[in-house]
Every structure is written in C-alpha cells, then in structure tokens.
Image (tube, helix red, strand yellow):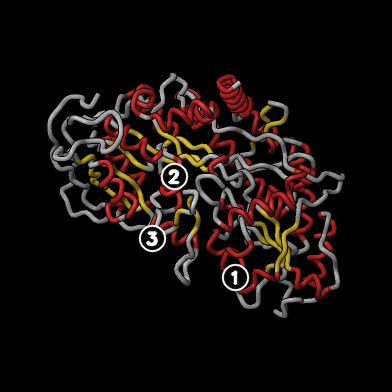
Amino acid sequence: MKKMIGMTCVAALALAGCGGSDSADENVNADRVDFNEDGLPLVDDGVDVSLTFVSPKSTLAPDFDEMVIFQRLEEETNVSINWNNIPGDGYVERKNLMLASNDLPDAFYNAGFSDYDLVRYGRDGAIIPLEGLIEEHAPNLQKILDERPELLAVLTAPDGHIYSLPRVEEMGLVPYANFTAINQTWLNEVGLDQPDTLDELRDTLRAFRDQDVNGSGSADEVLSLTPTDGFQGYFGDFFAAFGLPDNPNKLVVKEDEVIFTAIQDEYKEAIAYFHEWFDEGLIDREVFTHDTGQFLAKGKQDPNPLGAFVFWEIESVVGLDQADDYVLLGPLEGPNGHRMYGRSNHHEHHRSAFVMTSANENPELTMRWVDQLYDPKMSAQINWGPIGEIYEEDENGMLVNEELPEGTTMGEYRERVAPMGPSVVLEEHFGTVVDMEPRAKQRLEDIEEHYATYIWDENYPNVFMTEEELDRLNYIETDIMDLVNRNFARWLMDGGIEEEWDAYVDQLHERGLDEVMEIRQDAFDRFHEQID
C-alpha cells in the first residue's frame, strides 16, 4: 500500500527567538498528505510536506537544518523538517509556554518531557499515544522493543500507553560515573605505595600535606570532588566501603528491597569517619560550595592542589598536560573490611526523546520518519555524528572513527555534528555496526581492571510512576531531600551526627519518608512485573 489520505501542506513557521529563525511567533503545521507505507522515499516526488519540530540544541551545535545528517535524511525521505531550535537553557520555559497556550508543533525532538509532563499532557490529549503507530509504522523500533522488554517497560506509562520514544546507548558506562584518581608523582616523592584502604589514603593525604609536595607553602594538597554535580564527583561513592553504597537520590536496591540510604547505620558511620578528614584539612572545604566548573579549574591551577579526586575521567580534571601524573585507584577497603563499588541510578534506557502532539495531521508519516533513526547505523550517526565527519565505513560496512580535526576534542566535535535524540545503540551493535570511540573503550577497560569485581549487584530502575504517585512525591520528597542534603554537608564538615541522628531520623519519618518508600517500592515492583 502506498497511500493514506490528504493533499498538500503549508510551510511551517518557526517560533520567534528560537535559534536561527526570524519567523513569526507561531507554528503552522503540515496538512495531511499521502505517504508511502514501505521503503524510501516516504513521500513521492512532487508531494510537498514540511513537518514542524521543536528541539533544544547546545551552544556549539548549528541549527539542525544545517546539519549534514538531517540534510541527507531529507534527500532520502523527501520530507522536510522545519526546525525550531531553542537554546538549551531556555528550552523548558518555551516548551511549557507552547503547551500552555496550545501553540503546538508536530513533534518535540529531544523532547525533555518529565514523567509528570508525559502523564499530564498524555491525559489531557496535548501529546498522543504512540504504541499503535509504532506497531504499524515503526518496524525498526518495534523489533528493538520485542528484543528488549525492559525498554518497553521504561516507555510504558502506568495507563498502558506509550507517549514518548527512547534514546538508548548501551555502552556499560553510565552506571559507573566516578573513578578515584591519585597523584602518582606525589606518591613517588613521598615514598608511598598506592593506598589500598581508606586509612591508607588518609595517611597518604597527610604525607602530601606535611611534605608540601606541590610547593605552595600551605597545606592545600587535598582530596577534592564536586557533590553538587549530581552525577560526577559524588562524595557518597566512598560510603560503599562501609557496607552499603550511597548515591545522590539515596536509593539503593538489595535483594529487590528498595532502601533509603540516609537513615542506615552504614551512612551514619561513614559520615562520622569522613568528618575527621575534614577536621584535619584533608578534604577540600569548598566541595559543597564550588560548582563543577570551579572544581575542574582547580586541577589546572599552578600549583595544583589535587592530591586525589573523584570524577568521570582524569583528563577533564587536570588537563592533558598533567594527566600522566595521576593513576586510578580501585574501591578502597573500609575500616570494617568492606570493599565495594556502588552503581549510580542513572540509566542507559531513556524515554522522552521524541513526542508527537495532537496538532500533528501526519502522525503515521512522522512515525515512519522517526523510525529511520532507529536503524542501528543511523542511530549511531544520530548519537555521535555522520559518515564523513565522525565515521567512515570499513570493508564490512561497520562505522569506524575517523581522525578528529586537530585541536578538537571528541566531546566538542560531537556537539557540532550529532543532534542526539531518538536513537538506539545496543550492546551488540558495538563492534558489528559501529566501532566504539577510543575513550569509551578505555573506560570499559578501566572498569574491568579496577572495579568489576566489586560492583554492587542492583540499582533503582527507570520506573514510570502514576500522576498521583508523582504528585505525592513532589509534595513530600522535596522537603525530605532538603533535610537530608543540609545535614549531609553540615555533619561532614562540622560534625554532630552522633548527637543528632535519632532526632533526624524521626524528622524524616514525620515528613513522610515511609510513604515515599512505599511509592518507590510499588513502582519498582510494577517495573519488574512487566519484564519478568
């Protein structure tokens, strides 16, 4: 079958103030058009259709209509996309204004809808269910969902509908956000081996400080990190050495039980232990006040004050010139003999990469268009960049990395050439469809060498809650986490946890912690019922 119904389209206009557009502040969506249900192009020559997509973009990226990958896709599909690109820092506000005023594009690309947005606007009809469209018009994505029931569970709202499409990158990296690095040059200078326990790391930092290894004339050789990042540099990663991992949202899973770490004895013991380090000046006193940019700048100071640090990678913190001075440490043994490496609750399966609105007159055609991005080779290019800029094809048709332009880092170049968004790159695609980038390969090797033996078995999955559950969490959990985070920083720096602990735990229960944990456990159980 080749056709649906409809005729032509009208040109779609961009929102005023969105990057690269000087059009009026309105969206004009395409009229219904005939489309081809199989193969390419999606519409025949002479059929004029321009779908309106709204998307955020990074400051380094050009407008999406200038990106090679979308120019090629337009040639292959005969479908033009009229891009409204909004700078990332203003996107959420503009998106919310469009939804509130019912001034809707055909779709939001890289949509960034919260779970609350998805259930609310799905219920109200501003965005439409996609499961039927996927089944009928998205064979690439449907195949993936058939193979990955856990991804289907991530996408499926509690009402049974799918309101958004996924972005997946199964590299095995995101659950392991932090590595500990130590200055090997300084270890050599003070005549010490790499520490194997927390107590040995403490002694090492004392030696760095007492021998003034950076020559600053002050006791500034410290352990530093950046807990305010929420992902990288989190202090609680060290807490696993006391028998229970910690993470920024304080949720871990043990034998299918969801545990709130911030009321556990292991958490209390860890804070009391590390308060002594703060008292000795062994930990950067600015860890709770500097932001990630300020933290990264410290490693590039002269003299460099970082005896050890916790972050995603060494080079980001101290720069290429000093990176060889540092080595990675595996999980350190705690005072009671525990040695483990916790998982973050960040995930490789994400929803909200793409949503369609009720204003879209061509949902079937739109689904056929976006399904092109779920071809594995196209997904790799959407995620990292196109053939000819990031990749070339080898004799087997696999995408392999080209040399980057001189003076350019992979992270920067990727932002310029890869739009990100709806895509799925599965674990089995690496080495068959696409070659993993060198820095990712190195990270996997580092995980295997230093951490794999000690990794905590479970983490909290990317559950999808009901609107009622989200309402209750929004009402209760903010207050709970404010109390937890204020005391976390204060007790580490100033002490007092032993005297105040019982009253603090009572306060958390009074503020509704038991209800929060019941909601979290119910959502966890529902998720696993879907995939078991």
Q: Residues within 10 Å of mark 2 (few under 14, many from 20)?
A: many
Viewer-side residue, 144 vs 453? 144
Residue hosting label 2: 377
Q: Earlier in the sequence, mark 1 or mark 2?
A: 1
Amino acid at pointer 2: Lys
Q: Is residue 348 left or right of residue 58?
A: right
What kind of element bears circle 1? helix
Q: CA distance from mark 1 to mark 3?
A: 22 Å
Residue 204 in the image: above or below residue 501:
below
Amino acid at pointer 1: Leu
* Residue at the image point whose x is 62% and y is 78% from the top: 302
* Residue at the image point whose x is 32% and y is 39% from the top: 108
What kind of element bears circle 3? loop
* Residue 452: % across, % down: 73, 45
Residue 60 circle label: 3
* Residue 17: % across, % down: 24, 53
Q: Is residue 48 visible?
A: yes
Q: Is residue 107 left or right of residue 491?
A: left
Q: Earlier in the sequence, mark 2 or mark 3?
A: 3
